[in-house]
Image: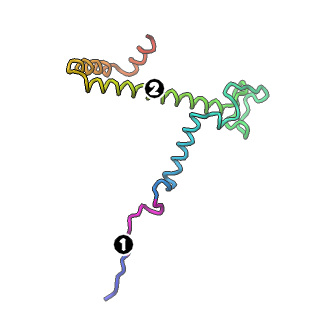
Amino acid sequence: MSDLLLRVARRDGGRYRNPWLAPGTSIPLLLVLLLVVAVFFPSLFTPYTPEQMDFSAILQPPDLRHWFGTDQLGRDVFTRVVYGTSLSLSIGVGATLIASAGGIVLGTLAGLAPRAVRQLLVRLLDIMLAFPDLLLALLAITV
């Protein structure tokens, strides 16, 4: 009879004991952290301002000074992209915070208010949800 050795496999999570140190987790987290820092502090990543014009560098192709090149007024395109992204994401975060605060207030009011107020809130929200989002956005812009 032959001896058979079996190695018992351990489930220790692979090569990295801490899953936060695995490259599949840490590299994307570092990129997200870099994006968050770039959103709140765009001047750390660009040596120029978005409005700064250099008439000697009009419509230049990408190089080491201007990573995305320059536009027809000599402005650095990378700088404008970073600042534009910062503004866009800041507006998105602000709108989300305002909507969350409104939802918390309405939810608390609906949960703690008497039945008549609760029914009124539910009906108002049903009416709002019945409108298509695009139509509601156009209505909000025109008012």
Taking the image as shown, residue 126 lies to the left or right of residue 101, namely left
Residue at the disc numbered 1: 8
Magenta stretch holds residue 16: yes
Horizontal and vertical percent position of residue 112: 25, 25
> Disc 1 marks which amino acid?
Val
Residue at the disc numbered 2: 95
Task: Please determine whether, in this image, residue 17 is positioned above or below residue 71.
Answer: below
Horizontal and vertical percent position of residue 62: 70, 37
Label 1 crowding class (10 Å Cα cut-off): few <14, some 14-19, many 20+? Answer: few
Question: Which segment did they paint magenta?
Answer: 7-17
Taking the image as shown, residue 51 lies to the left or right of residue 103, namely right
Considering only order in the chain, which callout, 2 or 1, is on the residue closer to the N terminus?
1
Q: Nearer the viewer, mark 1 or mark 2?
A: 2
Secondary structure category for the residue under label 1 = loop
Q: Which mark is residue 64?
A: none
Residue 111 versus residue 27: which sits nearer the camera? 111
Residue 87 versus residue 110: which sits nearer the camera? 110
